[in-house]
Image (cartoon, helix red, strand yellow):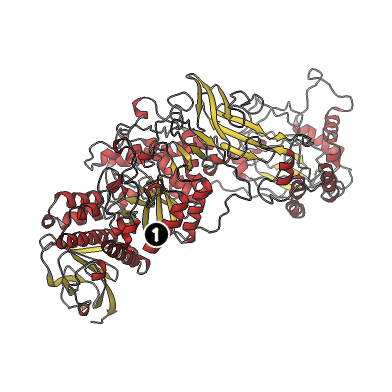
Amino acid sequence: MGSEEVLLKPPVLIQQSTLQNQAPRSQEQPDFRVSMFSSTYPAPIYPLPTNFSFLKRNFTRSNSGGSAVLLSSRKTNINICKCSATDHPQSQPQRSQRPRKKTQQPDTDKEDGIDPVGFLAKQGITNRELAQFLRERHKALKDLKAEIFNRHLNLKELASGFEILGMHRNVQHRVDYMDWAPGARYCSLVGDFNDWSPTESCAREGHLGHDDYGYWFIILEDKVRDGEEPDELYFQQYNYVDDYDKGDSGVTAEEVFKKMNDEYWEPGEDRFIKSRYELAAKLYEQIFGPNGPQTEEELEEIADPHTRYKAWKEQHKDDPPSDIPTFDVIDDGQEHDIFDVVSDPVWREKFRAKKPPIAYWLEIRKGRKAWLKKYIPGIPHGSKYRVYLNTPMGPLERIPAWATYVIPETYNNEAYAVHWEPPPESAYRWKHKHPPKPKSLRVYECHVGISGQEPKVATFSEFTKNVLPHVKEAGYNVIQLIGVLEHKDYFTIGYKVTNFYAVSSRFGTPDEFKNLVDEAHGLGLSVVLDIVHSYAAADEMVGLSFFDGSNDCYFHSGKRGHHKFWGTRMFKYGDHDVLHFLLSNLNWWIMEYQIDGFYFHSLSSMMYTHNGFAAFTGEMEEYCNQYVDKDALLYLILANEILHVLHPDIVTIAEDATLYPGLCEPTSQGGLGFDYFVNLSASEMWLSLLEKVPDNEWSMSKLVNTLIGNSNTVSKMLLYAENHNQSISGGRSFAEILFGSANTEESILRGLSLHKMIRLITFTIGGPAYLNFMGNEFGHPKRVEFPMTSNNYSYSLANRCWDLLADEIHKKMFAFDKDMMKLDANERILLRGSRGLPNVHHVNDTTMVISYLRGPFLLVFNFHPINSYDRYNVGVDEAGEYQVILNTDEKIYGGQGLIHPDQYAQRTISRRTDGARFCLEVPLPSRTAQVYKLARILRV
């Protein structure tokens, strides 16, 4: 054998990653532990420490311990081979080992394909300050992940806090509550289940009540019913949900344990199960003799491990053969980076085939009937509760931060959380799977509360019944829900969130929201949630502000902790526990409610310390100066990385008015990782043109430049002509502007024409995503005004007038919108073109004509209020016959029908126009647009 060897007889599984990640034990910290091995196999005669950190290179250990260890101050190559005390003599030749060549570690970033500034070259950005900022941000991200891994096993665990925080039913007939309040000195739960007593249900010492990070843990034990005896087993478990109709099987735990010992163990394997102290006693006697020392003072100096090993080997050389697999650890004295592990294949297969006795353990678990017979729930379903905290500010009552159902303060009644634990027979069960991830988005933006016909708050159930079928009929494939997260004040539309893990109770229960999402999936609609992580409501009782009595629990302290204009609180994204809360919140909505994506609201509020209200000139330095919140950017990167790894089909949309560089670039290339970004300038441009600029003065060049923006990013752009901002945030919808004072046939025709053309060009000229706010597809004429003090809390404008669909004009507008959606649903027009982008080849400010190509489609717009053109020349790339498939001027859409059906088919002319080889001469009435499709290719 080699110069250094130690006999290891237990089954050993060694992984290189484990060895590399274990820190060596210093000489000042000797290991006195005795190994307690798996009861699957008899324990070894010779001991081995439970961890293998002694195998790590450059490691030495004090030999004052009593267990056999390997002492080596150099890198070691480890071979494990089968041996026994009798059939492995000292003279057995050592296995020949070929030293492995040490290789230099390559650059990690390049090896993993990571380039912190990779997207800059793609977008043609050469700013040095921004490049340096991105490199520093990437280093900060690596440091942040290293810090995270000191507390969490992986990023998935970081984003799964909802599995332990909040209120959870434990299998051992109790409910566990956990929350984070680092500034509190005392924590308890108060509610109707304990007569609102602040002392009955508190975090107790000795029950993991409080840790160093500020997390509080409270156990609410179920109460034993009168006449029932407590469980004999302390660890008795119950199945509350699955197979809830099954009661106690009547088999006792002792019977199950006896059955397991009789059936599971092979002869001899249960030796040390029946005699648990035999191993320790034999080990002690083996090392010290039958009359060994009883105190540390009597302990004599112990020989070094090598001497003890040789003596042990000599003593057991004549032992009879054993079936127990044994191992030698051999050090050949050479330096190696990789440990070779060689074991007996027969034993290895036997070890892998041995399954843990989980089936026997599950037999001990009792069913729901047995639990209900013996116990009364410590906190029944529907109980009202709050968390009571003793803080430097004095005693406080708060709504738990992780509460999943909250009744906010109404009519002078204090807010409270509701324990939501419906019995399994009435709990919601999902019926439909997620629809496939859409390649192009046709988003229908909705607000549940104003979705009803009546002037009142609509519910989830009403929305499911009335609105979802309309969305499906209209041809959209995604619904985006705003205002779903719980918010105290209805007039805030849901953007001042108070409870991030709760659906708004004014709309219904959590199960009713699940039904809404489920039915949407059944109709093939993906569900995107408008998430507000850029700020939070400043409410204290129901919100997170001063949650634990301190100003800097979830938010920044001082001025930075408050939004400059909106009166909201700003999250402290650099805090590990705040990241834990927000990232878990994203994962929660996916896991609990099967959400398909997120629309991240108002990112500029969080990415800049000035909340995005500074004047932007477009200089690159503005994206990397002292006003940029690097912690917020790191949060967004982590959010996108985690979401796309855990849920590959998730969709993330960024709303950022400053269009931060790299919004939709991969995080590995220095981007933030979003799937889409919103072009907010488009709706502002349309609003400005409609309200301030005469029709004949519209600039076609400005219009196209605004809609397309940066050509390097248009493939990820989401466009909309108008969203909720135009009709909710104190403004007017386009229909209200166009038809508000229209009392003549000419003015109505103008309104219809511009409404259709604005929507069509916005839909087709940008990227693969388009958004429309509820009701605007049929020209909803009224603005939205939520009930507030200024309107005496009236609901008269907080609804949608669905009855307008029976009106002739609105019916025609809806018909056009449906056929416009079919351009993508049937023809996939949003995915056509070079790299999925349009080729805008004709923009004429004089004639006010715009024309562009998307694959086989030609789109022509004439915005001139007066001039019509009988034979207008536009270029095309392919020679052939083009057919009109959509015309805004058709009578079924409220137009005049000026183009005769005979003119719908047009053949190309061999004439170079607009940089293309061929030309079409098309009829083009004023304020009309047509979509042509190449129906037949002609060979030239």
The correct choice, above or below, for 593 with respect to 228 in the image is below
Q: Is residue 767 visible?
A: no
Position of the N terminus, as image quadrant, is top right
Mark 1 packing: few (<14 Cα in 10 Å), some, or many (20+)? many
Position of the C terminus, as image quadrant, is bottom left
> Residue 893, position in %: x, y?
26, 67
Number of marks in picture:
1
Q: Is residue 414 visible?
A: yes
The correct choice, above or below, for 873 with respect to 504 in the image is below
Viewer-side residue, 529 vs 161: 529
Q: Which quarter of the picture shows residue 282?
A: top right
Q: Which quarter of the picture shows residue 10?
A: top right
> Residue 124, position in %: x, y?
27, 51
The single residue placed furthest to the top in the displayed view is 297
Q: Is residue 53 left or right of residue 122?
A: right
> Residue 715, position in %: x, y?
32, 57
Viewer-side residue, 80 vs 470: 470
Viewer-side residue, 73 vs 263: 263
Q: Is residue 607 left or right of residue 755?
A: right
The residue depicted at 34 percent of the width and 58 percent of the height is 803
Question: What amino acid type is highlighted by mark number 1?
Answer: Val
Residue assigned mark 1: 471
SS at circle 1: helix
> Residue 937, position in %: x, y?
28, 79
The residue depicted at 54 percent of the width and 39 percent of the height is 161
